[in-house]
Amino acid sequence: MTDIAAVIGALQVPSAAGARPVADLGAAHLKAHGLTLFRGDRCLFKRLDLEVGAGEALHVVGPNGSGKTTLLRTLAGLTLAEDGQVYWCGHRIESVRQEYAQDLAWCGHHPALKDDLTLRENLSLHRRLRFGRDEDAVARVMDKLKISRLSEIHAGRLSAGQRRRASLANLLLSEARLWLMDEPLTNLDVAGKALVKQLISEHVTGGGLCVLVAHEAVEIERVEPAQLELGRKS
Amino acid sequence: MTVQSRPAPAGLWDVWLGIVTRELRLAFRRPGDMATPLIFFAIVVSLFPLAVSPDKQLLMKFGPGVLWVAALLASLMSLGTLYRQDREDGTLEQLLLSGQPVSVLVLGKIAAQWLVTGLPLVVISPIAGVAFFIPEESLPILAGSLVLGTLSLSLIGSVGAALTVGLRQANSLLSLLVLPLVMPVLIFGARAVSLSADGETTGGSLYLLAALTILTTTFSPFAASAALRISAD
């Protein structure tokens, strides 16, 4: 089994499996061109264009069912658009799938926690899949998000807000340039909401990119998110 | 976050080991789920002599086939849930977007799944073999052929599980998809055991079985990762 894993690695990544180079596609830049998406036979949006550069944020708004989450999934490459193309740093995302995924952190509806594992185990496995074993980074991030005291609690016993914080911890542990966040403010208390906004502010002012989907207006310090409204009758 | 300040991506070996560790840890926190296929195997195997006949000659004749079919169905039981949990709790999306080759992640999941269901079946199969009067010298052949057989079943089944992960009737569909594909495995596996019980050479069947295992190991991780991408859509 182990040899096979190595062989597959060698096939997909030309360099040695142990020390893979950090993918560098150049200046971070997300662009979607002419996206058209249907759900069933209902058109969610047609020929949608958007652009997010380094140090910029995009706030997607729209009523329920207007395709916000689907758009976010399309940007992540999880859902295929009927027409149109998403580009990362000028490359089609299908052609740089692995590099794109390394640059991307996904914070979806579900927090991606295993109920039977403790919070720390969940987070360190998430970290391990991306960068190898690194308990220090996990401890640092848990401190930052003030969830250290929950570290040995099984994820199944966490409250909805605590799970949200845990998925934010996953986001930070990914160390990605592009954050795709689906309703990051739901289930959070006032302090939690402030924390999310602060994290986004730090990320974006530090040169990161953020696309976030949220019903409510999001005011973020030192960041002027561009607005994209979906589901308008035209 | 600049690319340069980021640590290098994890090595594939570490990624594989990480997935295996997680899956094993999850399995051991739910020992009940692990035991179900084993109990199923034991019950099916003991039902046959009751239903047909406790006659020694007869049992010896259909023993290898019964053991193989029971092992096949038992390990199929746990395949349905291989990716379902991951899809429901959002882990699947994170795996697909982890920046690692999905085929390696799939291979890790299959390895762990085999360790918790296939391996225990292999371990208890000689006991079941004795109950069917399979001669002592054929028991290693039984266990060995089941190692290869359950491995290829897990590998083939993972493709079916990946294809059906989002569907409502996933379990019945999975059996319909997978069982026809594992027929060659069943034929060569059961044949090897009955040949050995009759005192004949088993090399041919075992080699073919091993070839099938290598074939499925080579292709199914890629097929399963492609299927997962489709199912995640």
Image: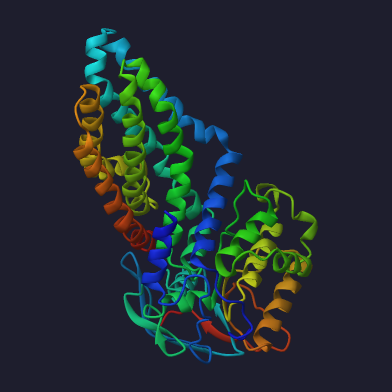
Instruction: Identify the coloring.
Output: rainbow
Q: Residue at x 27, y 53 (%)?
A: B215
Q: Is residue A222 visible?
A: yes
Q: Which quarter of the figure has residue A206? A: bottom right
Q: Residue at x 39, y 24 (%)?
A: B126
In the image, B4: left or right of B154?
A: right
Q: Is residue B169 visible?
A: no
At which x and y percent is residue B151? 36, 44
At which x and y percent is residue A204? 65, 85
Q: Which quarter of the figure has residue B136? A: top left
Q: Residue at x 63, y 64 (%)?
A: A133
- The one of B156 and B1 positioned closer to us in this rendering: B156
In the picture shown, does residue A213 fall above or below B170? below
At which x and y percent is residue B57? 22, 11
- The one of B35 and A14 positioned closer to us in this rendering: A14
In the picture shown, does residue A42 fall above or below A99? above
Instruction: Name the image quarter holding the C terminus of chain A.
Output: bottom left
- The one of B133 and A29 positioned closer to us in this rendering: B133
Q: How many marks?
A: 0
In the image, B29: left or right of B95?
A: right
In the image, A16: left or right of A119?
A: left
At which x and y percent is residue A8? 38, 65
Q: Residue at x 47, y 78 (%)?
A: A100
